[in-house]
Structure formats: C-alpha cells, structure tokens
Image: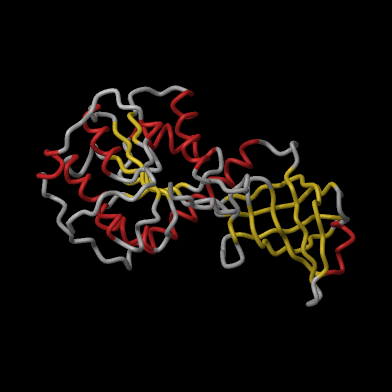
C-alpha cells in the first residue's frame, strides 16, 4: 500500500459539481466543522486548479455533466499525470447502481471512496468525515485561519480608559485573532488578561468581542503581537460570521485563480473500456487497496 504522510495543516477539499443535497447538507456541515472546502463547477478547469494544489482531495458528482463512462475516463486519467497522481479522488452519486460503484472502485485509485447519497442522516455525515479524517483532511489544526495582512476590509481597535487604540489584524479564525500594535499599550495584553471592548471589522460587519490573551511577544520593530482567544461570552453568530467570511475569501481566491487557467479540452467520451468492465456484486471493499497503482492504461 502506498503510504502518504498526512499534512500538519490538512488538505484542501474540492467538490466538483456538487448536487443541491451535497452542497446544502454535507458541504454546509463540513464548513461548520472547520474543514477547508471549495466548490468547483466546471470540470474543464478542475485539473488546472488541482494541479496547483497537489495532495488535495476532490469529490466528483458523477450524476451531472457527463455519463458515468466519461467520468470514469476523466478520473482514470489522473493516474497518467505527474501533477494529479497525488490527488485524493472520491466519487459522490445519488443515482449510481452497485455495478457502477464496483467499476469505479476496482479500476480507479479512490482513497476518497465511492459515496452513494440516498439519505440525509447523521450516519452519512459520520461516514463521510471518517474518510476525510483518515486521509488527514484537517491535519493538526482545529480551526481554519485566514491571513488578513493583505485584506483591506479587516480592521480592529480596542477601547480602554476612554481611548481607542488601533490594532492591525494579522490573522483571524472563529476561535480568535492574532493582532499587532504599538508596544506602548502592551500592558493591556498581558497573558491571561480578559479583554473586552475589542472591536473587529471584517467585510461589512463590525463585532465587539470578548477575548482572553493567550500569548504576547515583543517585536524588534517597536510593535508587539498578541494571540487572542474568543471567550464563551461571544454569541455563536460572531463565530459563524467569521467562519463564513473566511470561506468567502478563500472561494474568491479560487475564482480568481480559475480565470487564468486554460480549459481542459481532452476528450473523455470513449465508452468502450467502461462498458467492458465486469462488476461483482457484494464485493468487500475493505480488502481493496485503493492506493495501489492501477494496471497500465492507454492514454485517453
């Protein structure tokens, strides 16, 4: 079996052409649980963005855009590209038969599995997240963090003693922030200090937050940096808004990158191989090494 070390900071998770059920149920759940999720809507651009993000995960809805045989060719072609062999592919379908599942599972490297979505239950979400976690989707991180040093719609200040002190927001997450400021106010950010009246603006919303100072350090340039953790006094709406803000920013970066990616004009319409595959009912996939390289295939 091919062994690949799970990354410390997790993996990007792409969903190609997700159905309404997948987007509103699974993807929404993953976002709330701090997985780094992206949606792709054009398979002609998918390989380009995945090539730039090797070792990411990609779950493909095979019920739309193309017949299963064409999706089979599309996904099998990943093993022929040096830039795509490391992508953790998975399949999602609400309509596929057991024969289709068997053909994909036995002939394509699918560390992301083949998911038949025919019900919306906690068990479905549990099964899906287990696949993500065993492949290191979250890494060691618990929360998504956005570097905001180049974002122009993020700012902060602290109200203390009748004065307002400007803060530079270094990064932001639904758990807290890293901020820098002039050293003359470092006494306000001693470790374990409860900081109230911290105003953070992100996008179109301003939030007054309550935080605990987790750590503070002095910099050589006359500034100081503190890591602040949101307390339970903050409403869940604050955390939800920050989480949505981070996902929107990440999605915008992907959309910008997609504009410069050329279309994949390869043909995936040959159905001969897929139709010739023999499916086996009730196969035990637990014994299938889906990370083993497939038999050599002709270029599609």
Q: Identify which residue, 37 or 52, lies in the foreground.
A: 52
How many marks the image carries: the answer is 0
Q: Against 148, is 19 above or below?
A: above
Residue at left offset 46%, top offset 37%:
131
Q: On the picture, is 164 further left or further right than 82?
A: right
Residue 61, position as x, y percentages in the image: 29, 40
**Could you say which quadrant of the image residue 80 lies in?**
bottom left
Q: Identify which residue, 131 or 229, lies in the foreground.
A: 131
Residue at left offset 42%, top offset 59%:
54
**What coloring was used for the rendering?**
secondary structure
Q: Quadrant of the C terminus?
A: bottom left
Residue at left offset 52%, top offset 44%:
35
Residue at left offset 55%, top offset 52%:
204
**Could you say which quadrant of the image residue 33 lies in?**
top right
Q: Residue furthest bottom?
A: 221
Q: Against 124, is 221 above or below?
A: below
Q: Identify which residue, 182 or 124, lies in the foreground.
A: 124
**Could you say which quadrant of the image residue 64 lies in?**
top left
Q: Identify which residue, 203 or 123, lies in the foreground.
A: 123
Q: On the picture, is 260 further left or further right than 272?
A: right
Q: On the picture, is 124 further left or further right than 182?
A: left
Residue 234, position as x, y percentages in the image: 71, 39
Q: On the picture, is 176 further left or further right than 41?
A: right
Residue 294, position as x, y percentages in the image: 29, 49
């Amino acid at each position: 079996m091919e062994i690949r070390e799970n990354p410390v900071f997790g993996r990007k998770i792409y969903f190609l052409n997700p159905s309404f059920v997948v987007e509103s149920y699974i993807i929404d759940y993953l976002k709330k649980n701090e997985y780094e999720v992206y949606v792709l809507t054009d398979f002609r651009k998918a390989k380009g963005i995945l090539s730039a993000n090797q070792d990411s995960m990609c779950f493909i809805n095979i019920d739309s855009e193309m017949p299963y045989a064409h999706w089979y060719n599309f996904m099998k072609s990943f093993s022929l590209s040096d830039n795509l062999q490391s992508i953790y592919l998975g399949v999602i379908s609400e309509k596929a038969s057991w024969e289709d599942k068997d053909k994909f599972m036995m002939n394509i490297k699918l560390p992301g599995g083949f998911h038949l979505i025919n019900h919306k239950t906690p068990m479905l979400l549990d099964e899906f997240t287990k696949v993500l976690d065993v492949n290191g989707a979250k890494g060691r991180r618990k929360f998504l963090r956005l570097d905001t040093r180049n974002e122009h719609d993020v700012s902060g200040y602290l109200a203390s003693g009748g004065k307002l002190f400007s803060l530079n927001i270094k990064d932001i997450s639904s758990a807290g922030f890293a901020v820098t400021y002039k050293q003359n106010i470092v006494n306000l950010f001693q470790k374990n200090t409860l900081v109230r009246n911290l105003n953070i603006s992100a996008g179109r919303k301003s939030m007054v937050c309550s935080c605990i100072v987790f750590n503070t350090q002095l910099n050589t340039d006359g500034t100081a940096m503190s890591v602040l953790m949101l307390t339970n006094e903050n409403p869940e709406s604050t955390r939800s808004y920050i989480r949505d803000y981070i996902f929107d920013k990440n999605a915008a970066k992907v959309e910008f990158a997609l504009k410069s990616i050329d279309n994949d004009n390869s043909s995936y319409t040959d159905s001969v191989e897929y139709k010739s595959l023999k499916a086996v009912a009730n196969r035990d996939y637990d014994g299938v090494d889906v990370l083993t390289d497939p038999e050599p295939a002709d270029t599609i």
